[in-house]
Image: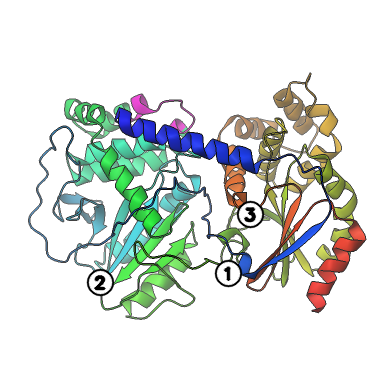
Amino acid sequence: MSSETGRRFSWWWFTALIAITLLAVACSGDQTAQDGDYPALEVPANSDQTTPAPEDPTSGATSEDGDSPPPTLTLAEPGESVAPSGTSSGALAGLEVGFTDEGFPYRGNPDAAVTLIEYSDYACPFCGRYTDETVPTLLEQYGLTGRVKFIFRDFPLVSLHPTAPSAHTAAICAGEQSADLYWAVHDEAFARQADWTGLPDPTGFFAGLAGGIGVETAAYQECIESGRSDAQIEAGLTDGQALGFNGTPTFQLIADGLEDTYTLIGAQPVETFQSYLDSLLAGEAPDDAQTAEAPGEASEPAGLPFWADFNTGLQPDPDRPGVNLAGDHYKGNTDASLVVIEFSDYECPFCRDHAMGTQPVIDEALVDTGDVLWVFKHLPLDAHPSARVAAVAAECAGDQGQFWEMHDLLFETVGDWASDDIDTDAALIDLAGGQPLDQSVFQQCFASRAALERVLADMSDASGIISQTPSFVVVQGDRGTLMQGSIPADEFVASLRNRLEG
């Protein structure tokens, strides 16, 4: 990255830290129960992983033309935009690959009737999941058949992934040499997420990766040092923000003959993409589709965010029992008409009061009976320095089907791992050692960044909505109600029963 863009990314990162700090007020000295009703919980819809992108949206269109001139892949001069022009520069795994006239990398038929544009972050675990689990099926069914063109746009969320731009830069600089090399680096960057996302500076890692793929080293290094890839990365951020996107992965779908464009948010099941694409290929609007705003237009409130939507994030993840598609742990009846989403902090005394005193009563009265689905989200506050690590421990136990057991144990033993004179990491590992867990697997998870990413994603989901712990978003139909504070068990149960009977 150039020094100028580096300063911009640093400023965005600093701004995000300030925002999180402002969000993370202490559990709130005033814990009087508060109950506020918000039509559709009017906040922007977030992705599976998501964090708000840096704010400074201007205008910008994401479009492509039909006929294009032959490809011209000459290297840009230092300071010029890196974006190659033309529609075709080769083939990769049986697919045509190239760059649109605007310089956006694509694979598939450049004249396909439907275009799927992905706004993505190489360090985002949900983007990696989409690339690993969903993309192969979509490319086989819709790319190789020439029916859909797949475009990738850079949308690194530096507030969560400050090193993500290194991966975007590496792919772009490889793409200066050919579209084949662009997509090869793209695929490897996602496939090897675990190898570089924990590095303080992955620039050297990507230099080795690119060289191993066949990228010419001198030209690649010159591109990296020039910083000319910054313009393409910033263009992706600007265009995505202008469309109202604030999380990754987010998708824009465009079909010939249809005036509207459509948006999909998050690493949805492959069946959801198939449903959308099949409808668009038939010249029809997808069922329950969200129409995308035109660039620069003011957006209406987006309704329930992804993690609170019955039709998307609250749906069970078929590959992770007890976890929904938003990545959150749940208990109770997944078909219940009433959902409570709890934001909590393992070091917060009011959260402990709820977990130890109120929650068992709610579980017996409403959750165990199938009337209420209970969902848990992490919101470790800055005032509690050990809470974030405890949340990671809960996630790692959850990977082995022991989330709720570890959840209860963390609250019960908070004095054993959260004291100033205690090594929290060691204490939590010891705590897990007494549980029926594969200790090697647990410790490997605990030492990695994967579980922390899930915690950070929950913190991002809370931004602009939740300002204290514990807080509860009660979802019924297309409406969400925010309840805050330590609420007596009888009052909480009565409130939920009233909603069920109302």
Q: Are marks 3 and 2 in contact (CB under 8 Å)?
A: no
Q: Position of residue 485 (x, y in %)?
A: 80, 51
Is the residue 90 above or below the residue 311 in the image?
A: above
Q: 479 or 406, which is in the foreground?
A: 479
The amino acid pointed to by label 3 is Ile
Write the start and end of the magenta stretch as one range: 195-206
The amino acid pointed to by label 2 is Ala
- Which-is-in-front pick, marks 3 and 2? 3
Quote the CA–CA distance across marks 1 and 2.
27 Å
Between discs 1 and 2, the one toward the N terminus:
2
Q: Position of residue 180 (x, y in %)?
A: 21, 45
The part of the image, by quadrant, that contains residue 22 is top right
Question: What residue is rendered at 21% in x and 33% in y?
Answer: 215
Is the residue 253 above or below the residue 92 in the image?
A: below
Disc 3 crowd rating (10 Å Cα; few below 14, some 14-19, many 20+) is some
Q: Which mark is drawn over residue 451?
A: none
The amino acid pointed to by label 1 is Asn
Residue indicated by mark 2: 113
Question: What residue is rendered at 35% in x and 27% in y?
Answer: 203
Between discs 3 and 1, the one toward the N terminus:
1
Q: Are marks 3 and 1 in contact (CB under 8 Å)?
A: no
SS at badge 1: loop
